[in-house]
Amino acid sequence: MMKVLLLHNEDVPWRGPWASIDWELIIDLGFAAPSTYKMWSERCGTPVRSIHEFAGDGQSYASIPGILDVGRDRLVDRTGLDWWEIIGVVKYHELRAFYLLKCLTRELGSNAVYHATRGNSYTELLSGLMGRPIPSFQAVPGFLERWTRSLRSAVKLSPANAFEIACDKWDPDYSVRRHFAKAQRASVDAPTVLLPSAYSNVSRLLLQYAADLPEKQFLLAATRRSGASAELPGNVRQAFLSSYAQPADVLHGEEKDLRSRWAWFEKTVLTETEELRASRAAGVWQDFPVHLQTGLRLRDAWHTLLKEEPITAVLCADDLNYYTRIPLILAARMGLNAVYCYHGALDGGLLFKKAYAGSYLVKTEMEREYLLRGSKIDPELVEIGAPSSFISRLRRDRQECGRDIVFFSQKYEVMGGRTAEIYRDVMPNVCALATGTGRRVMVKLHPFENVRDRERVLRSVLSEQQISLVKITAEPSLEQVLTNAWCGIGVDSSVASECRSAGVPYFLCGWLDHSGFGYSRQLARFGMGRMLDSPSELDAIPEMIADWNAWAQPPQVSEPIDSRVLERMLFGTSEVSVKQCAS
């Protein structure tokens, strides 16, 4: 009998009631650097590994469509939207976990006995797969503990992000916000392309494409405040989706009918496969009715916008978030031009999302190759072309000998990452590099990160002398950051391609890439950055930069979009008058 401890990513092996037990294997349900697990293994006298070792190069995500296939076309609404597929994709974290857990149990065999430091989604899924509960040392948190944990998480957010999350949680379908926004509709009067957005980085790319057709009209429709923009091209208007939201009673019993069909679905379809039975037992789908209610009201808001404004096309840059995916699907069903362009460098969601767009815009050959390799999209539907400002703006102000070593941080916690351990593995070497080259360290935060929280993490892993070299910025302007950059360092961030466009050498911390999407390998293969295999290789960055041109000469990083091609894709054969959709 093999005793295995499942370690929650907020716990450590040597602190807690589990510390006095002799385990034969400890599996971290989070992830950190290999050096962390080596140190922990030596300290505990027990092998410590991460569950994310089993992710593979896209295989964990590619397993998701097979799980969802059983339920397709069984929860279709009057407009033709398949809510099982739309909501199922939202659960990609949990569905991917099945793959990781099945790999683990297959390797360890039937003699393994599992205990958990505390209950969590992984232990619930494993219980469902094994047909028996996984005992844990810490009880399921009560209301007070959950409230305290939520408060701790909220403190880590900026006030703006905390407000956004509160609105998303308590008013997801605009039942309240619509009363304050109805008068703010765009009321455009010429053929217009709809740009749906929930986040600033999505809006940024959409507005760049809009700027390449200055004679055409565009409407940026923000689903939340962070999707709005203070700087709009002259040919773009802006509105909030909440201004098009409808009263709940306009659903005319449709929601009741779909809820009834879901109740049947839950009792029958969710028992047809091992994964679905286990996911049901683990409670993965218990919030499906809530998502369904929100989704139907979002659908009606988007449908109202598409009917009342002269929309000829939808250009979507985020079709994983169903807030902005719904208008893309509606456009395709209504005979409008439905065009998709991913807001980052590579879209790993293509491994498991259903493709709805009629055509696709990619910024680089690297992105095109990744898209075609990860999906069944017809190559004839894919056009290569980045916005002209995406290519020219960065390089124009670039200083060849910048003073900053920029570390592009990420919200590692989203995937279970141990941020303090990741910083501990990277930042001392980065500070040593800064000291040796007479530069400073700039930590560029992701929009979801909080400056105060990251300052706390840095002070826990760096000395005061090292801290003096570091500046943290949440500045949204990547252009300003890159203007002063000597080099960029990150894990698998899509900013690698923007660094390459700006002529900034970029280095990938490949030993920390646990995403399972294969981003860092793709970025390195196409010359967007140089792959590093350990923290010690950070010391050699000056030599690698000196030799940069000898090995980092990829094909053109981005090709500018031909404005005639973009106009054809967005304003071509579609006519506003052909819009047909069930009402």
Image (tube, grey):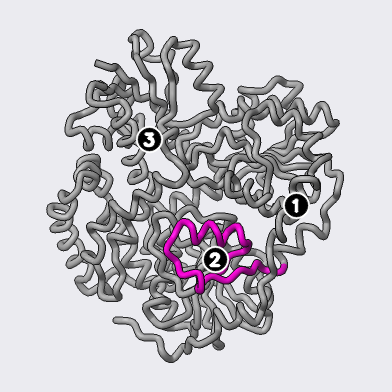
Residue 414 visible, this angle: yes
Q: Residue 394: x and y, percent?
A: 76, 58
Question: At numbered mark 2, what does the secondary structure look like: helix, strand or loop?
Answer: strand
At a point 26% along the width and 49% down the height, the residue shown is: 285
Extreme front residue here? 550
Q: Nearer the viewer, residue 449 or 246?
A: 449
At a point 31% along the width and 22% down the height, the residue shown is: 138
The label shown at residue 147 is 3
- Rounded to the nearest angstrom, the CA distance separating label 2 from label 3 is 39 Å
Question: At numbered mark 1, what does the secondary structure look like: helix, strand or loop?
Answer: loop
Q: Are marks 2 and 1 in contact (CB under 8 Å)?
A: no
Q: Nearer the viewer, residue 329 or 473?
A: 329
Disc 1 designates what residue?
553
Q: Residues within 10 Å of mark 3 (few under 14, many from 20)?
A: few
The label shown at residue 341 is 2
- Rounded to the nearest angstrom, the CA distance separating label 2 from label 1 is 26 Å
Identify the magenta region.
361-388
Q: Quadrant of the N terminus?
A: top left
